[in-house]
Image: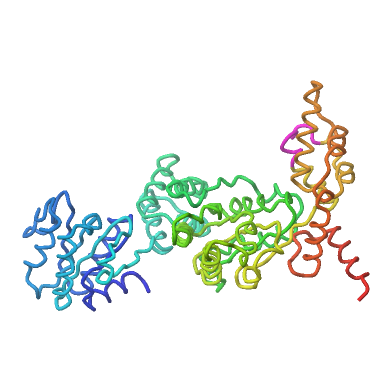
Amino acid sequence: MAFNTEFELLLRARYPLLYIATAEETRLEATIQACAAHLGSRAVYTWDFVDGYQGNPNAEGKGKRNPLQALEFVEQLNPSAPAIFILRDFQRFLNDIAVSRKLRNLSKALQSRPQNLVITAAELEIPTELGEIITVVEFPLPNAAEIRSELGRLISAIGQRVDEASLDDLVRTCQGLTLERIRRVLGRAIATHGKLDTDDLDLILEEKRQTIRQTQILDFYPATEQISDIGGLDNLKDWLLRRGGAFSEKARQYGLPNPRGLLLAGIQGTGKSLTAKAIAHHWHLPLLRLDVGRLFAGLVGESESRTRQMIQLAEALSPCILWIDEIDKAFAGLDGRGDSGTTSRVFGTFITWLAEKKTPVFVVATANNVQSLPAELLRKGRFDEIFFVGLPNQEERKAIFEVHLSRLRPHNLQAYDCDRLAYETPDFSGAEIEQILVEAMHIGFSQSRDFTSDDVLEAASQMVPLARTAQDQIEALQAWAAAGRARPASRFDTLSSRIQDQLRDRPT
């Protein structure tokens, strides 16, 4: 239900005391004024601790620095005169016994009057004794239509024309910010180069980063990696590129639902985390990283509260990418946990949100030991797709070498035999390839020369890849994927092919 509709319904139903937690005080009060006018010109009285009541000549300054007197003024007003009383930051006085008692007395009287008290605050703080008489109303952040209207006003004011696709990108990126923050960051963009365009998307993402810095649950990750920085994984790349415009208003009009997310399962060092960063950069969306360990706290009930706070924050900043790295370490072996069910309750809240969320929060979860994850997390409906990221084949290893060498030696890339390097490094992961290049650079640097392909091969000969040190675990993981439990991220995976051959050759 839209805020205006719900708020007007509560006013007409004579709910005596409403509580609205929001940082957008100005926008909220303008919305309340509009609702009051729509209901037949209800009087609106606004009070704060410093200036008392404002905006009405008959009440100017009353209750100044006196919250109890502010409530007494409500009693003195004509009981048949429709009115709304906005009490700014009044939650700070709710623990005072006199204020608490006065509010409970007033709530009984106001049930028979066309008058309502509205507490506005940045945070929700309700004492237990007032929980029964206070109704909490959620005031959402600006929706796409409001943001589009504000952008249209600014664009018109500077005499600029913006094409529809660019406007859609700006609207989508601004979602999750307050109207005041949107005006501020767009004003900064206009002051910088006198216009608005898609080059300003990074400025908007920086403004979102400021919001994230105020919490210790999520991290705002700078995403500079591009899809082209990923060597191989062609199936996964194609899947992502097809969904590049799925968060746009055009996609909603087409009937497409918001993409839910994906689970990247596979071997360590194969590019799962890099993929999460590249998605955020390619889609121009903020990347929020969740360390699941931060959800768990010592106090009873605090872990569940932090989980709900994480969900609310991610939804407030949507559309966004929520990256959950190594989710298997948090939720593996739930039945054996000795934490009085805390992990199970956190997991239950999380997977329920995954299945029911309507907001454009794209979840990218990575897992190394996917076999240990609860079956409920893997069923369809939690994620759009589960991809298995295996060890790169020879062609993909060549692409990985080219990606790293074009960054390390862009002026001298042709000096390296990437075909030979790829052929001589079977079973090496992307992370291991990067490490042998670092080792080759050490070899060259120690001899005061540039490193060569031979140095890379020497470094590779000294490294034992994970595919050999943890062969049993990796083969078991490959067998899990080869059995059809996940979609391959690569178009052709040599190890998966070998495993499939072994499975076919087994006697039944």
264 or 172, which lies in front? 264
Left or right: residue 429 versus residue 288 is right
| Vertical order, 383 against 61 (above or below) | below
Left or right: residue 288 versus residue 115 is right
Outermost residue to the top: 448
Q: Residue at x 81, y 29 (%)?
A: 451
Location of residue 16 by image quarter:
bottom left
Is residue 410 highlighted in magenta? yes
State the image coordinates of residue 404 (x, y, percent, origin top left).
74, 40
State the image coordinates of residue 177 (x, y, percent, origin top left).
41, 54
Q: Main secondary structure of the magenta part?
A: helix
Location of residue 83 by image quarter:
bottom left
209 or 380, which lies in front? 380
341 or 414, which lies in front? 341
* Rendered image coloring scheme: rainbow
Q: Over which residues does the magenta segment extend?
A: 404-413
| Vertical order, 105 against 244 (above or below) | below
Give the position of the N terminus as an image quadrant. Answer: bottom left
State the image coordinates of residue 170 (x, y, percent, origin top left).
48, 54
Is residue 293 highlighted in magenta? no
Q: Residue at x 43, y 63 (%)?
A: 144
133 or 251, which lies in front? 133
Left or right: residue 152 versus residue 295 is left
| Vertical order, 269 against 367 (above or below) | above
Give the position of the C terminus as an image quadrant. Answer: bottom right
Q: Residue at x 6, y 71 (%)?
A: 78
State the image coordinates of residue 356 (x, y, percent, origin top left).
52, 72
Q: Residue at x 38, y 53 (%)?
A: 156
